[in-house]
Amino acid sequence: MEPYKLGEMEQKFADLIWEHAPIASGELVKLCEQAFSWKRTTTYTMLKRLCLRDLFENVNGTVQAKTTREDFQAAQGEQFLIENFDGSLPRFLTAFSRRKRLSSHEVEELRRLIEEYEEEQGGND
């Protein structure tokens, strides 16, 4: 099982935890019962699965994030680029822009991101 690929319910569960973490595991059970109609055992089974992926941990009955949502999404994006575009962001953007024209706002945002990156790197690769 790949660490950065989640099924639909795993993703919804992870989002719920990220929204409320740190959270008591008993409170998480109640939230999952309301949000997903899950039984206690289902919540703990799903939690264990995501803890094994190193996203969360349950320490003394408190569930906390080991990875932020933003870091997880960045890793998902990286994995997608590696699997589908040999890790090349330019190849991805080329393929993407063939089907969907970038707006002038999006182009400007990309320019800004590149400029910020260059400033952070001191102009080096």
Image: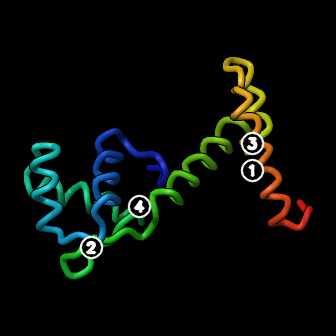
Secondary structure of the residue carrying tag 4 is: loop
Q: Residues within 10 Å of mark 2 (few under 14, many from 20)?
A: some
Label 3 – label 2 distance at C-alpha = 39 Å
Which comes sooner in the sequence, label 3 or label 4?
A: 4
Q: How many marks?
A: 4
In the picture, measured across the screen, residue 43 lies left or right of residue 2, that is left
- On the image, the x and y values in percent for residue 98 come to 74, 19
- On the image, the x and y values in percent for residue 79 come to 60, 47
Which callout, 1 or 4, points to the residue nearer the camera? 1
Q: Is 104 situated above or below 26?
A: above
Q: Which mark is residue 53?
A: 4
- Of the residues shown, which amino acid type is indicated by label 3? Leu
Instruction: Look at mark 3 in the image and give the residue it sits on.
Output: 110
Q: Residue at x 16, y 45 (%)?
A: 35
Secondary structure of the residue carrying tag 3 is: helix
- On the image, the x and y values in percent for residue 68 come to 46, 63
Instruction: Look at mark 2 in the image and give the residue it sits on.
Output: 58
Q: Residue at x 78, y 57 (%)?
A: 116
Secondary structure of the residue carrying tag 1 is: helix
Q: Which mark is residue 31?
A: none
Q: Quadrant of residue 45?
A: bottom left
Instruction: Look at mark 1 in the image and give the residue it sits on.
Output: 113
Q: Quadrant of residue 109?
A: top right
Q: Residues within 10 Å of mark 3 (few under 14, many from 20)?
A: few
- Of the residues shown, which amino acid type is indicated by label 4? Arg
Which callout, 2 or 4, points to the residue nearer the camera? 2
